[in-house]
Image (cartoon, rainbow, N blue to C red):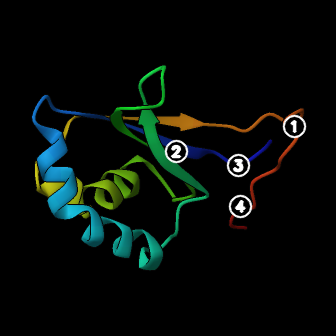
Amino acid sequence: MRPVLFALHCLDGDDAAERRAKLGAEHSARLRTASPRPLVCGPLLSDDGERGLGSLFIIDVADRDAAERWIEADPFRSGGVWREVRIHAFRQSANASVQFPTSP
């Protein structure tokens, strides 16, 4: 059976743009140094690509508690950028064209 990863779906609050701008450098620095580093991460955008709506991460951690600790350490979480964070176990399909590396 393939390893379980975690998908973190983070939605911005209504007043997130100013907070996002203020905390952006700190958030980006954390993503470069976090352990583990995200396998995939990036902003969620409006359909026209003009407005940020939140963030998406796929991480390889041992369990849901570790995923919760990982996201709680992000400046966007503590700084109130995200109004909602959803964490889901995720198992990548063997049919996916790109395969994520996973820990043993």
Q: Earlier in the sequence, mark 3 or mark 4?
A: 3
Please state which of residues 4 and 35 is positioned toward the viewer in this rendering: 35
- Under mark 1, the amino acid is Ala
Label 2 – label 3 distance at C-alpha: 10 Å
Give the residue at x 84% y 36%: 96
Quadrant location of residue 55? top left
Pinpoint residue 74: horizontal percent, then vertical percent. Answer: 27, 61
Which class describes the residues within 10 Å of circle 3: few (<14), some (14-19), or many (20+)? few
- Under mark 4, the amino acid is Thr
- What residue would you read off at disc 2? 6
Residue 81 in view, yes or no: no
Instruction: Left or right? Give the position of 13 relative to 94.
Output: left
Say whether marks 1 and 4 touch (CB < 8 Å).
no
Say whether marks 3 and 4 touch (CB < 8 Å).
yes
Element assignment for label 4: loop
Element assignment for label 2: strand
Instruction: Left or right? Give the position of 53 relative to 33.
Output: left
Q: Earlier in the sequence, mark 2 or mark 1?
A: 2
Please state which of residues 2 and 36 is positioned toward the viewer in this rendering: 36
Vertical position of residue 86 compared to residue 60: above or below: above
Viewer-nearest of discs 3 and 1: 1
Element assignment for label 3: loop
- What residue would you read off at disc 4? 102
Which class describes the residues within 10 Å of circle 2: few (<14), some (14-19), or many (20+)? many
Label 3 – label 4 distance at C-alpha: 7 Å
Quadrant location of residue 104? bottom right
Pinpoint residue 29: horizontal percent, then vertical percent. Answer: 36, 76
Pinpoint residue 73: horizontal percent, then vertical percent. Answer: 25, 64
Residue 43 in view, yes or no: yes
Q: Which mark is residue 59?
A: none
- What residue would you read off at disc 1? 94
